[in-house]
Image (tube, helix red, strand yellow):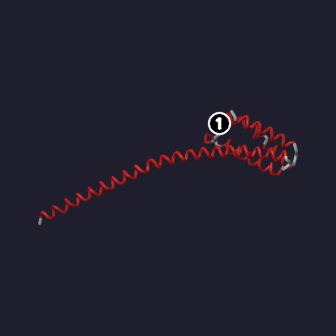
Amino acid sequence: MSEDRQAKPAKTTHRMRRFVIYVALLLAAFLLGFIPIWATFRDNSARLSDAARQLDMVRMENDLASAAIDARLGNYETARQSASDFFTLLRVETSKGTESTLSQAQKDGLQPVLAQRDQIITLLARGDATSADLLSDVYVAYRKVMSK
């Protein structure tokens, strides 16, 4: 009888070791599959973030160009809305700090553009034709600063 009692604990210990080994192997297999997927996710996330930043920059330029064109065509309300969107996005981008896609030189160069915001919006709200010239000048200044 005492041999049966000693055989059972040995069998149980052997089964427990086998179970632990299987769990460890499953965990290792999971990690081998998880790590490449995680690395791919991280790369794609970084690329998506870069694409979103570039999209914001293109939207800003598009809003400014649309405002200039609409003002030339006499669509002052549409131009005012586009100009307002441009200045809002520009203000947000220049306020981001280190997370901004703009360099410090670009931020400094765009401050005079931001300073014209109220004047341009007011002229567009009044339907003043000089707003088209101002918007064209702002567009040229913006492109010059962004090309640096």
Q: Position of residue 57 (x, y in %)?
A: 68, 43
- The answer to which image quadrant residue 104 occupies is top right
Taking the spot 16% from the left edge, 61% from the top edge, the residue there is 7
Horizontally, residue 128 falls left or right of residue 82, namely right
In front here: 14 or 96?
Answer: 14
- Label 1 element class: loop
Q: Position of residue 43 (x, y in %)?
A: 52, 45
In front here: 11 or 99?
Answer: 11
Q: Position of residue 23 (x, y in %)?
A: 33, 56
Horizontally, residue 136 falls left or right of residue 96, namely right
- The answer to which image quadrant residue 64 occupies is top right
Q: Residues within 10 Å of mark 1 (few under 14, many from 20)?
A: some
Q: Amino acid at mark 1?
A: Ser
Taking the spot 27% from the left edge, 56% from the top edge, the residue there is 18
In front here: 42 or 124?
Answer: 42
Vertically, is 147 above or below 120? Answer: above
Horizontally, residue 127 falls left or right of residue 85, namely right
The residue that label 1 is drawn on is 103
Q: Which quadrant is home to the C terminus?
A: top right
Q: Position of residue 63 (x, y in %)?
A: 74, 46
Taking the spot 63% from the left edge, 41% from the top edge, the residue there is 100
